[in-house]
Amino acid sequence: MIEPDFLKGGKRYNDLKSYWRNLFGCNVHKLQIDAGFTCPNRDGHVACGGCIYCDGRGSKLRQSGSLPDVAAQIQNGKKYYEGKADKFIAYFQTFTNTYAPVDKLKLLYNEALNEQDVIGLAIGTRPDCLPDATIDLLSDYAGKYHVWVELGLQSIHDKTLSFINRGHDVRQFYDAVHRLSGRGLNICVHIIIGLPGESDDDIRQTAKAISSLPVNGIKIHSLLALAGTRLGEMYKNGEVSLMTRDKYVSLVCDVLEILPPHMVIQRLTADGYRDILLAPDWVKNKLDVLNSINIELKRRDSRQGRRLPQQD
Ligand code: SF4
């Protein structure tokens, strides 16, 4: 059995920070950007109201009423990481960051890449918002920069996508991955553990499906009930229950064991939202969740990819 490199570094999964340090030989951080996009699942293009857990507020910058330009957001973000990072990835995070004509996208992405020490892009988007012309644009950048396309998926089951009002189906996800792959781009998929109606096996099936695709990275988080969302209302009415910390930790470990060792684990906990979080309370202690995942993997004497057939 070949041991993955992250084990030599004392890790049990392929974390993003270490991955970038090995790749670039320095500390790299993402800088979050709100470029003013909306979402086709909120504005009526695909559906109205968005995913049932989406709070629809955008970033803190947007909430404050002023949205500085992309360059200014990068310059501000860099100040925060002074002495902690050498290079940066411009992370277009808020809502759907390919939801505009290609010419406009190009202007915004160029503005970010023209900033000093920005070595790449991470573009958060939906599988149904990637026309071929946009993929061509992103692929052009990939020749010179480190580029990630982050696809919101959440579950591989259509019954769940329909329940959470994603506004796209699994077929559209497979189509997006197919058209993105082989273009020099890194593909990251976002999933949620604890979606209503999903069994443990449903969650493991999502991980299995992703592990069989040309996907380079994953973000995992637990379902959060937020004030002002449809899910928040359902939670308050007792229509949905949320996962305990121990259950979440156990399922994250199950998922990690199914994912191939080369897949970069970009996130294992939910972040932010403290001001409108209804439940679960345990997500507030991010460090405790991460420690618990490490402890559970150690208890199982396990690691990322441990349950893949070729690893045994
Ligand atoms: S795709 Fe993202 S931004 Fe759009 S409604 Fe869903 S969670 Fe909100």
Image (tube, helix red, strand yellow):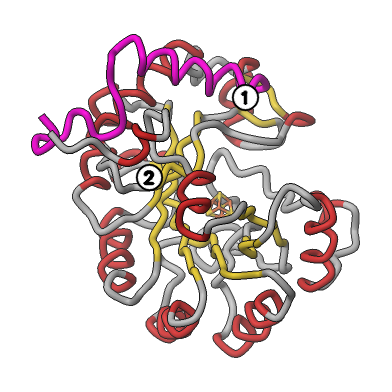
Q: Secondary structure at mark 2?
A: helix
**Label 2: which residue?**
161
Q: Is mark 2 within 8 Å of ligand 1?
A: no
Magenta: main secondary structure: helix
**Label 1: which residue?**
286
CA–CA distance in space, label 2 to label 1 = 27 Å
What label does residue 253 carry, if any?
none
Residue 247 in the image, given as x and y percentages of width and height:
41, 14
Q: Residue at x 57, y 85 (%)?
A: 101
Q: Which residues are magenta?
A: 283-312
Q: Mark 1: few, some, or many residues within 10 Å (few <14, many ≥20)?
A: some
Q: Residue at x 65, y 61 (%)?
A: 88
- Residue, far right: 65
Q: Which of pointers 2 and 1 lies earlier in the amino acid sequence? A: 2
Residue 291 is covered by the magenta coloring: yes
Q: Residue at x 57, y 38 (%)?
A: 53
Q: Up-down: is 284 above or below 210?
A: above
Q: Nearer the viewer, mark 2 or mark 1?
A: 1
Task: State the quadrant of the C terminus.
Answer: top left
Residue 170 is covered by the magenta coloring: no
What amino acid is at disc 1? Lys
Residue 118 in the image, given as x and y percentages of width and height:
66, 69
Q: Nearer the viewer, residue 196 or 217?
A: 217
Q: Nearer the viewer, residue 64 or 78?
A: 78
Q: Up-down: is 40 above or below 108?
A: above
